[in-house]
Amino acid sequence: MQPGEFEGQAARRQLERVLASAAFNRNERLSQFLRFIIERHLEGEDSQLKESVIAMEVFGRRADYDPKLDSIVRTEAGRLRARLADYYAGEGKHDEVIIEVPKGGYAPLLRHRLVQREEPKPRSERFRFLAVAAVLLLVAALIGGWWWFHRSSQPITIAVLPLENLSKDPANDYFADGLTDEIIRNLAIIEGLAVRSRTSSFAFKGKPRTAREVGAQLEADYILEGSALRAGEQLRVNTQLIRVRDDFTLWSGRFDREVGDVFAIQDEISRGIVNNLRLNLGHGRRRYETSVEAYDLYLRARALPYQKGAAGQVQSIELFEQVTAKDPTFAPAYAGLAAAYAVRSVLFVLPHSDDELSKMRATAEKAIELDPLLAEARDALGMVYAHDGRWDLAERSFNRAIELDPNRALTYNHFAIWFLMVLGRINEAVSQLRFAERTDPLAPVIHENLAFVLTSAGRYDEAADQCRMLPQDDPPVIRCLARARLGQGKIDEAIQLLARVRGASPNEGFLGYAYARSGRREEAESLEAANAGSPQILVLIYAGLGDKDRTFEALERMAPEGPGRIGQYLTYPELSLLRGDPRLKTLRKKVGLPE
């Protein structure tokens, strides 16, 4: 390795260390900027780090971007240089690898820190004693200052474990789970708290554990745990806040109320945590009020996606519609309904009626009208805009959702998959999913989508690592690992994996692609004949056979599905044979994708 050059792994480790620091972890724009230029640099594409490219790829500017009229790249580069300088003067002052962005360009410079030692000069004993004392005092002051800065600038991490359902009736789990979910959401918008997402917290449901075990796995400083007992219209909730490092209970609360007081209980729990951790409640928090019946339906609807995945989210539509009929002012129900409509539009890809699409948009906009500061409403609106191909509005909505609630892993996930991946902004999608992973480290959907995006980025070893974090018997997980193996050139192993999940679309397509790549043309053509009515499968088989014309024909047949599905397919490494073909531009324009 030549001086000044770094292996990709070392550079990426340093990048992740910088992005996780207090200087960057809350600044999404600068984090994306830094990740983009580092990734391009490691790929040997410094020549592509031009102002116009960065403006479009990082900051979403149009192809006709004029740097003379819009100085965003130069402005943000200045901020990036200053932020890196702050990091290396503080948290990163002992890091071995230094990242710099020299003035006059955007290609980063990575170098080892040079440590120079000077030989001590002779001193008298008395002078040496005074010097040592002064140094010790200075070190003590620096340590105290660092501790105070670190304590005040780093968010406090907290995990809310599922409230135990004491009613002994599993049918009431949805209520205890829903109450836990609402507490997580209330805490997530409090300034100074980094709240672990629901999926990671619920990985411990019903399992014996200690606060230290949970804290270690979720990297949490504090744990909130407790129980809920509902008997008719009466509700008892017990909670306690535990400091992980010494298993000390900082605060506990017991609430005996009527079910209708559930919102007041949530507020009091948040206030108890805030007062004991010396935080600020922040501004713009809205206190919701609704009927017991409407809230019960709302919690049942919220539980379905966690019980049954995407199919459960579609099933929640009926319950959310009942909630909004009973209470037309309950914003979270409209947000949940809009998200469910959007997911249904992806699962059932046949063209929808104008009435259904109008309902999807109106529902998201209603949630914003009722509560402009509700992050999940902004997220849902971003999904709706992405579905419509209104890319500028979608990006603004997702960014606003992240600004309102930077702890919500689902928003990062939706932004990456619904928007960035569709537009081919793959490195940014990886960045967003890395944020989601830090917030929700045990969520299978995050690891699955991260593997999916890493595969499109050509980072197959990392994709395989993500696949191995998932339950190993699920068909999507097997497909996940098989695609990583295809990218690694391990075609026979990929075929063995895909053969285990035959019959599920799009697994058949990837299997046909693998057959074709391995020279087993007859088997690939057999799958082609069996799936003549499925362009999603055929497009992969034709690509494996090297038939560009029929690959484009299959993509054309997918056009009615809208830009989302086509955009994602175009990032697949399996379709790399199409890159550079002028027909791509025509296809993108036809389905509403930016050129």
Image (spheres, rainbow, N blue to C red):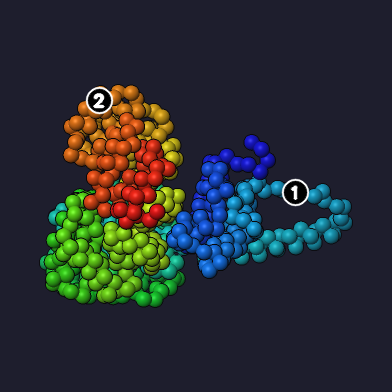
User: How would you rate the neighbour count of disc 1 (Cα within 10 Å): few for under 14, some for 14-19, many for 20 or more?
Assistant: few
Question: Label 2, on which residue?
Answer: 523
Residue type at the position of mark 2: Glu
Q: Which quadrant of the view contains residue 459?
A: top left
Tell me: 421 left or right of 105. Answer: left
C-beta proximity under 8 Å, tags 2 and 1 = no
Q: Position of residue 309 (x, y in %)?
A: 23, 50
- For the residues marked 2 and 1, what is the alpha-carbon distance in whole angstroms? 65 Å
Q: Please give the name of the residue rendered at 79% of the width and 60% of the height, measured from the top-left corner.
A: 131
Q: Which quadrant of the view contains residue 557?
A: top left
Q: Please give the name of the residue rendered at 25% of the width and 60% of the height, measured from the top-left corner.
A: 339
The correct choice, above or below, for 215 with respect to 64 in the image is above
Nearest to the eye among marks 2 and 1: give it.
2
User: Quick one: 466 or 80, which is closer to the camera?
Assistant: 80
Tell me: 135 left or right of 454. Answer: right
The correct choice, above or below, for 198 with respect to 12 in the image is below
Tell me: 324 left or right of 367. Answer: left
Tell me: 69 left or right of 202. Answer: right
User: How would you rate the neighbour count of disc 2 (Cα within 10 Å): few for under 14, some for 14-19, many for 20 or more?
Assistant: some
Q: Quadrant of the N terminus?
A: top right
Q: Secondary structure at mark 1?
A: loop
Q: Secondary structure at mark 2?
A: helix
Q: Please give the name of the residue rendered at 21% of the width and 75% of the height, measured from the top-left corner.
A: 329
The correct choice, above or below, for 152 with respect to 347 in the image is below
User: Quick one: 37 or 407, which is closer to the camera?
Assistant: 37
**What numbered label is drawn on residue 116?**
1
User: Quick one: 99 or 524, which is closer to the camera?
Assistant: 524
Residue type at the position of mark 1: Gln
Q: Which quadrant of the view contains residue 342?
A: bottom left
